[in-house]
């Protein structure tokens, strides 16, 4: 049995050696399985690639795939999965926030017959308060309006069988939202929790805007509910306008005409204008997604690798 450890890396020179030592230590203590490392260098600006090459030189289980530029973690995970040949594949972060020590437990789950062993973070101690709060709200919202169920705290750290890996890469959309994809493909999944830790060294690549964009991407990728907002909003406004119209007619019949109404007029105009623009904006968001998707550009471009038969993404 062969297990691929897929590790997306973007500017991880500060932790990559630490990660390798820890992961090699863990897999060294597991009998009955062979392990390969697939490091994906996602266009790092530091010497992450040099470290990967050094590791590959001293350990022939180390494979690296180096992108032509930064394509994002989603692309890096996809490239890793496309180039994985093992019976099982596990995706982990380079910063040791996804403890390799859980691998034996994941293998046990696979032996029990599961196709996937996924993890969720029991705590979010490594994250700032506001991020935790907003993340919780996001998961509450997306689970309500989308066809898939994404547990809060579920990360990309998971082990998958070959069957599931094939299914995940068959969903070859350019704008990938892996959490949704993992859930959409289904399969028997065992959930295990682990305690959150801070990254071992280096810096997180996320900022507020990045996370917000990610949240919008997740919602638009797995739900068409926002497109229907116009229907609900429109119905609500029409219904209340009708009631208001009746009120005005009766009032005019009883009390006669009155003139002033500038303030209410302008407020209603602005409110309606806002609603219309909001709905246009939502539609625009989906049209933009369609536009990018129909261009069908490759999700990643490999510039350098030591994988025997590298799988690029050109013939999508
Ligand atoms: N990463 C990547 N490409 C990017 C950003 C991040 O491959 O454009 C990798 C990064 O090297 C790390 C993992 O994705 O292995 C998670 O990134 P990070 O630790 O910055 O995110 P966080 O743990 O804060 O969610
Ligand atoms: Mg991290």
Image (cartoon, helix red, strand yellow):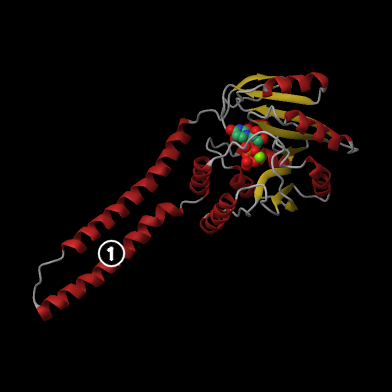
| Rendered view: 277 above or below 249 | above
Query: In the figure, residue 69 lies in which quadrant?
Result: top right
Q: In terms of depth relative to the viewer, which is nearer, 289 or 203?
A: 203
Q: In terms of depth relative to the viewer, which is nearer, 225 or 198?
A: 198
Secondary structure of the residue carrying tag 1 is helix
| Rendered view: 290 above or below 54 | below
Q: Residue 306 in the image: x percent, y percent?
A: 72, 19
Disc 1, ligand 1: is the CB inside 8 Å? no
Query: In the figure, residue 85 lies in which quadrant?
Result: top right
- Quadrant location, the C terminus: top right
Q: Quadrant of ligand 2?
A: top right
Q: Is residue 169 in sight in this rendering? A: no
| Rendered view: 78 above or below 148 | above
Q: For label 1, count other residues whose C-alpha is less than 10 Å away and answer few (under 14), some (14-19) or many (20+).
A: few
Give the total of numbered labels. Answer: 1
- Residue at 54% over, 37% down: 173
Q: In terms of depth relative to the viewer, which is nearer, 275 or 198?
A: 198
Q: Residue 186 in the image: x percent, y percent?
A: 66, 50
Identify the residue position indicated by label 1 in the image.
238
Q: Residue 114 in the image: x percent, y percent?
A: 77, 50
Q: In terms of depth relative to the viewer, which is nearer, 104 or 17?
A: 17
- Residue at 50% over, 45% down: 212
Q: Residue 125 in the image: x percent, y percent?
A: 67, 50
Q: Is residue 70 in sight in this rendering? A: yes
């Amino acid at each position: 049995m062969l297990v691929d450890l897929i590790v997306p890396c973007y500017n991880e020179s500060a932790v990559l050696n630490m990660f390798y030592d820890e992961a090699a230590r863990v897999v060294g203590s597991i009998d009955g399985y062979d392990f390969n490392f697939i490091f994906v260098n996602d266009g790092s600006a530091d010497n992450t690639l040099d470290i990967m090459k050094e590791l590959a030189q001293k350990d022939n289980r180390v494979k690296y795939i180096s992108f032509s530029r930064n394509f994002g973690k989603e692309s890096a995970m996809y490239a890793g999965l496309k180039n994985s040949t093992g019976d099982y594949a596990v995706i982990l972060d380079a910063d040791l926030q996804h403890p390799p020590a859980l691998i034996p437990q994941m293998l046990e789950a696979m032996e029990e017959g599961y196709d996937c062993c996924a993890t969720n973070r029991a705590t979010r101690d490594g994250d700032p308060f506001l991020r935790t709060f907003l993340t919780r709200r996001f998961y509450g919202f997306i689970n309500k309006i989308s066809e898939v169920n994404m547990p809060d705290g579920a990360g990309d750290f998971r082990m998958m069988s070959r069957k599931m890996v094939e299914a995940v890469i068959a969903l070859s959309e350019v704008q990938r939202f892996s959490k949704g994809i993992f859930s959409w493909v289904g399969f028997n999944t065992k959930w295990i929790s682990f305690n959150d830790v801070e990254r071992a060294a280096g810096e997180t690549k996320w900022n507020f805007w990045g996370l917000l964009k990610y949240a919008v991407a997740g919602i638009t990728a797995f739900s068409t509910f926002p497109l229907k907002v116009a229907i609900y909003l429109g119905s609500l406004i029409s219904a209340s306008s009708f009631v208001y119209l009746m009120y005005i007619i009766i009032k005019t019949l009883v009390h006669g005409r009155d003139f002033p109404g500038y303030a209410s007029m302008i407020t209603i105009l602005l409110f309606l204008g806002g609603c219309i623009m909001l709905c246009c904006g939502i539609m625009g968001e989906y049209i933009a997604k369609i536009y990018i998707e129909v261009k069908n550009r490759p999700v990643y471009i490999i510039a350098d690798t030591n994988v025997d038969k590298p799988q690029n993404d050109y013939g999508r």
